[in-house]
Amino acid sequence: MFVPARSPISSRAGSKDDRPQRRMPIRLGTALVAVLGMLLGPLAVAASAATTPHVTTVVMGSYVSVTPFRITDTRAGSGEPNAGKAISVNSTLDVQVTKVGTAPVPAGTAAVVLNVTAVEPSASGFLTVFPEGITTPSVSNLNFSPGETVANLVTVPLSSSGMVSIYNHAGITNVVVDVEGYYTSTPLGSNSGLFNSLSPVRALGTLDSGSAIGPNTSQAVTVTGSATGVLANATAVVVAATAAHGTKTSFLTVYPAGVSMPNASNVNFAVNQVVANRVTVGVGSYGRIEIYNHTGTVNVDLDVDGYYTGSGGTGSAFVPMTPTRLTDTRVPTNGTPIAANTSEEFGLSTSASAIPSSADAVATNITVVPSDATGYLTVYPTSDATVPVASDVNWPASNSRAVPNFTVADTAGTGSVGVYNSHGGTINLLIDAFGYFERQLPTSTTVSQSATSVTYGHESATVFSAGVTARYGEVVPNDEATTVQIGAVSCKAVLKDGKGTCAIANTALPAGSYAVSAIYGGDANLSGSSVSSDSKLTVYKDATRVTISESATSVIYGHESASVFSVTGTTHYGEAVPDGETLRVQVGSVACSAVLKDDKGTCTMASTTLPVGTYPLSVIYDGDANLNGSSASSVSKLTVDKDATSTTVSESPTSVTYGHESAAVFSVVVTTHYGEAVSNGETATVQVGSATCKVVLESTKGTCTISDTALATGSYSVSAAYVGDTNLGGSSGSSVSKLTV
């Protein structure tokens, strides 16, 4: 139990989706409520029993308003369908709704809005209106006492044949049924006919002051514009029409302005009786509706508390359901009796009701089983901090029959409502549901993959299967798409019959482990949904294979310009390693890098890079984010042989006089086999007889001297010798002339 503070103005500022303010019913004055005491008769209300709720026609539809027309009048001689077929006790009358009347309701319609009137019943009882062909549900739409004429607004799904059934609990009663409009089986593409609730605005108020409506007279009332908040192109409005101070037993007919007054009625009242009923009526010319009074004079209040959009509008579509009893505090089911000046919270979104918590509002029939005290009842969202000064159901003192009223219960997306009992005694409450309004039908998404692990570059692609269904198993329209997300990569699965596939190439994702999810963005009629797969997708690195070959297996140091090494890099299944990747060729302690293109590459080493020797050849690929590294060795080795050299020597002069000249100068040149110079700093030895001198080479050349006193007189052969080094072979040479001392 909760008792929020009461305030004359609701503090609620609006819902999370910025829709117009919700409907708030208007409270009748206490004096006017007291007049209702003339309603007499023993209590009769449908007993509660287990009801299995379900959507009769699995739809989410838009409202289409019609000029009210009559489809049944059981009074003898009425000239209407079912004339002379008054409903006897515990009996049912089947009524054809589609394809009859002045503005036929089309076949395939999901639900219909009716004004149902019980005319002069013989006993206290109730009527239940439900889709033809199903078991009579334990709900009630209209409660009556003997001899009175009473009406109530009814929203009910249609059977597949377009019919409804009307069950009479007790006695014999005539019934009159007028069509106010209908709900399509799918939302209109123009987005018209979507419901928006409003805080109530009084469009006409003559109960406390103002002129009464005279006999056989219609009064025009403007219902669109800034004063009411109803858009100019609205197709219909929901209003609370209250009649009081009638001077004769009469009825009111509410209809669109600009059309002929239809053969229909909405509010029936006796002399000085206060009677309220909700009306859904099309908006006529100049944004007006008409209120017709049949006879006598009567004061009327008209409060606008919701509307249906015109083309291009936004709002909530209607989902019909089998009439279902949600609450009966007499049992108690889903609640307890409400004490005076107390609020109780009632959950409308339950597992039994199948009404989602996301519903914006629920089409309900609220029935009060009152105590002996005058009172009123207010239904409001539990998100409101205060109880609004308003009412949904009113009853007088000493009222002995249950009092119903059709109410679009605004849940504000909470799945529950608060119900406030004004004052007097404790009351029992019955809540019956006939459908709900929701902006988008919730969906669920599934996703699976063809594999949970792949090798990068191996499989052609990973295939993902996505499916989207709406709450009741309907499939999403063909050609809508679901996005499958794997890491930073996604693909679009275009749906057909609610299913679709898409593929992601095995090279689109780097090696790693990835969560798999699917996202459906929704559309005008279906909400978005997403799901994460229980399995992840693991992308493993691919194995690689490298090879190496050389242009020659042996080289002479300094001879060839370079050694060329050819490498290849492929993956395990033969695909090329990506262009630009680098392989390292290792020869001894020396390496060169081969950049791949089309899985091949080369690198070179100068012939002077490696000392003389024999070297194994290998190639190494370090791998990357997606490929494992690998290495290979050549079956052959690279041998570097020493280069041959040649040495020449000459002297100047060729003859000397002992002790005369200062010295003899010897010039030596050492070259390699192919003419390259020996490294600077290398030495050669000049031999003249027993005397020698050392030549330090610079640019292959060098000189040394031998003193003229170092040799005895005589004639001497001149020779030079180069012993070689690590990479060059030794050589020697003799001068063509001799040195004479």
Image: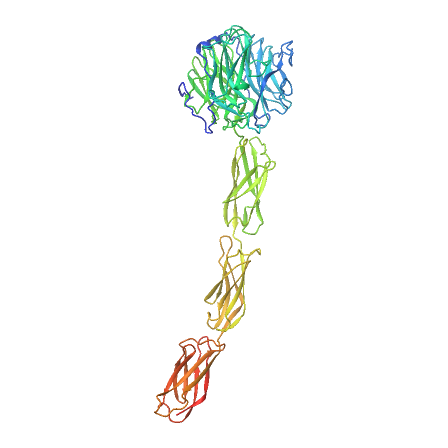
Q: Quadrant of the C terminus?
A: bottom left
Please determine whether, in this image, residue 508 is positioned above or below residue 274.
below
Residue 329 seen in the current view: no
Q: On the rendered structure, is 4 left or right of 231?
A: left
Q: Nearer the viewer, residue 110 or 232?
A: 232
Q: Is residue 34 visible?
A: yes
Residue 739's x, y, as percent?
Answer: 41, 90
Residue 455 x %, y %: 54, 51
Count how many numbered circles sit on residues in the image. Answer: 0
The figure's colour scheme reads: rainbow
Q: Nearer the viewer, residue 304 or 440?
A: 304
Q: Position of residue 179 (x, y in %)?
A: 59, 18
Measured as percent of width and height from the top left, residue 510 is found at 50, 50
Please name the residue shown 36% across and 87% down the image: 663
Left or right relative to 330: residue 8: left
Residue most toward the front?
286
In the picture provided, is 550 more to the left or to the right than 80?
A: left
Using the image, determine if residue 20 lies above or below residue 270: below
Residues 473 and 328: in front is 473
Q: Is residue 673 above or below residue 405?
A: below
Q: State which quarter of the image contains the N terminus.
A: top left
